Image (cartoon, rainbow, N blue to C red):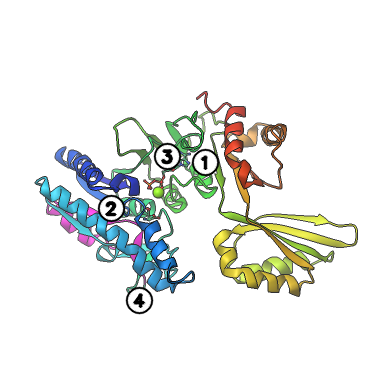
Amino acid sequence: MALIVQKYGGTSVANIEKINNVADRVIKEYKKGHEVVAVVSAMGDTTDELIGLMKQITDKPNPREFDMLLTTGEQVSIALLTMAIQEKGYEAISLTGSQVKIETDDHHSKAEIMNIDNSRLRNELEEGKIIVVAGFQGINSQDDFTTLGRGGSDTTAVALAISLNADRCEIYSDVDGIYTTDPRIVSSAAKLDYISYEEMLELANLGAKVLHPRSVELAKSYNLKLYIASSFNYRPGTIVEGMDEMEKRKSVTGITYDKDEVKITVQQVPDEPGIAGQLFTRLAENNINVDMIIQNLQHNKENDITFTVNKEDLIKNKEYIMKVSNEIGSDGVEIDQDVAKVSIVGAGMITTPGIAAKMFTALGENKINIQMITTSDIKVSCLINADDADKALEILHESFELDKQ
Ligand code: ADP
Ligand code: ASP
Ligand code: MG
């Protein structure tokens, strides 16, 4: 007998027919004699719809009430899935994040899980029940509801699997697994049988929304193997696991883009030691996360400092950024929201010369201008115009021959 944690995303429970399909899949494992904990997201686009309702009232909601609102989505889907399982003749119980006691820190809308008290889960499993848990939510030290950030149900599943020492952790969505790039954008994207935690973490952090980055981080720290597959068929999916050192590492495993960043140029600041330190210290003081940075020396002993931040951070901090720029003697701030960061990721990149050059050349030959560049051991990212993003994915996918897996 194995203990299995399965997670079903929004598209997998988008309507009653799909909820019944998930019920059948869960029961299938249960009938084999396994213990099953199913984690579910809100139905279809429910979370977006809830945010839409909120926006008719405010753009800057009270953080506690924002989470109060969003946690309702998952409460609907756990109740319906549990009823569907019961209707098919099996014992099941739904539990919210607070009922499970998924304890998080106090950061509403981006809370991190600190601890899970699994005693209730253990008791219900011992009584032979299938458990259905609401993804994406927990409670903080004041017993208020928190959410884990968009896509956070993946992290709930991984955290529960670790807490229960599960034998399997399976994440089901509307794609057959992890692909070389988003198969909705590039039709020749190829499904990967395996991907390392490191590469998956980069792809997730760099915009591939197929897994919540924190779920990969957690799985990596506890060496928990993940299985990613479709909830609509039984085709083999992708295993996310530690990398075998002997294995031949690909120079490029996957490609992704992120359209959630904006480019900010603080114009004409004095070319003096300490200015950049001052600027980025002041940004850090307000919890503004800076990603890419470049500095251009102008002829007149002044610099332009350009950096990227998350769109949300800009919305919340626009006035603060203006104020700080003014303080360091800048002549003005230019904001460009029409940018995308396109990234190639591969663990073998570090030992293969010329990968970055090949990326720049492919973009250049197709008249895609590179505005900023960052690199690490296993990734190269280029900031480009947002309108070129889909084309860039296609071009790079072909240049690195990722369709020929
Ligand atoms: P769920 O709602 O089940 O959590 P998501 O929408 O969060 O599912 O994630 C699945 C989606 O991720 C796919 O529909 C696909 O468009 C997108 N995606 C982006 N990059 C990739 C990739 N490299 N491999 C597979 N899917 C990807
Ligand atoms: N329902 C939440 C969202 O849409 C959490 C999730 O789907 O994982 O972001
Ligand atoms: Mg998701």
Measured Cα–Cα span from mark 1 to mark 3:
9 Å
| Labels 2, 4: front one | 4
Measured Cα–Cα span from mark 1 to mark 2:
26 Å
Work out whether mark 2 precedes mark 3 in sequence or the reverse, and give the earlier one: 2
Q: Secondary structure at mark 1?
A: helix
Mark 4 crowd level (few <14, some 14–19, many ≥20, 10 Å Cα): few
Measured Cα–Cα span from mark 1 to mark 4:
37 Å
Asked whether mark 4 lies closer than 8 Å to ligand 2, one says: no
Tell me which residue sits at (42%, 64%) in the image: 111
User: Which label number is shown at residue 199?
Assistant: 1
Q: Which residue is mark 4?
A: 142
Tell me which residue sits at (59%, 54%) in the image: 261
Tell me which residue sits at (60%, 71%) in the image: 286
Looking at the rendering, the stretch of residues picked out in magenta corresponds to 117-140
Work out whether mark 4 precedes mark 3 in sequence or the reverse, and give the earlier one: 4
User: Which label number is shown at residue 263?
Assistant: none
Work out whether mark 1 precedes mark 3 in sequence or the reverse, and give the earlier one: 1
Q: Compare residues 336 and 230 and report the one nearer the observer.
A: 336
Mark 2 crowd level (few <14, some 14–19, many ≥20, 10 Å Cα): some
Work out whether mark 1 precedes mark 4 in sequence or the reverse, and give the earlier one: 4
Q: Position of residue 101 (x, y in %)?
A: 28, 65
Measured Cα–Cα span from mark 4 to mark 3:
35 Å
